[in-house]
Amino acid sequence: MDRAITCARCLADLRTTTSIVSKFNTDWICRDCKTREVAHPKYAEANRAEMEAVRRGDMNYPGIGVPAKLYRPPCKAEEFVVTARLLTRDDPEPVSVSLPESANRYAFPDGSRAAVLPTGAICVLAYA
């Protein structure tokens, strides 16, 4: 696979920033787009499917497909996730959609919502 020079989602210059291949497909993406991807509710499914493919010996697994929301500009909940990553210097952990009562939930003016668990894991609950 040839390495791209621009992020497939936000068109950032990958020659000047950290990049990685998406778990949803074979696109090269920047770190901010990876942060958005990890916070997406379908990330755990995409990660699990890729791991199963690799265990079967499929090193060219194309992925489950990118949710359309990840090709659009980030909503406020996603901006929150990216900012949290910048402040903590940690990548968000994928979380399940069933959240404990102790999770802090945030609603944003654009209608998007995010949650932070006591462990620090962050996810987007609803996109604008």
Image (spheres, rainbow, N blue to C red):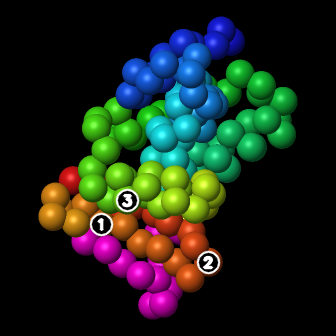
Q: CA distance from mark 3 to mark 1?
A: 10 Å
Labels 3 & 1 near each other (Cβ < 8 A):
no
In front of the other: 26 or 19: 19
Q: Is residue 96 above or below residue 43?
A: below
Provide the secondary structure element on which disc 1 rests: strand
Q: CA distance from mark 2 to mark 1?
A: 18 Å
The residue drawn where x is 35% and y is 52% is: 79
Q: Mainly helix, strand or loop, the magenta region?
A: loop
Q: Amino acid at mark 2?
A: Thr
Dot label at residue 80: 3
| Marks 3, 2: nearer the viewer | 3
Which residue carries the number 2 mark? 119
Q: Amino acid at mark 3?
A: Phe
Labels 2 & 1 near each other (Cβ < 8 A):
no
Q: Is residue 52 magenta?
A: no
Q: Is residue 23 above or below residue 85?
A: above
Determine if residue 26 is in view.
yes
Q: CA distance from mark 3 to mark 2?
A: 17 Å
Q: Is residue 103 magenta?
A: yes
- Magenta-drawn segment: 96-107
Q: Residues within 10 Å of mark 3 (few under 14, many from 20)?
A: many
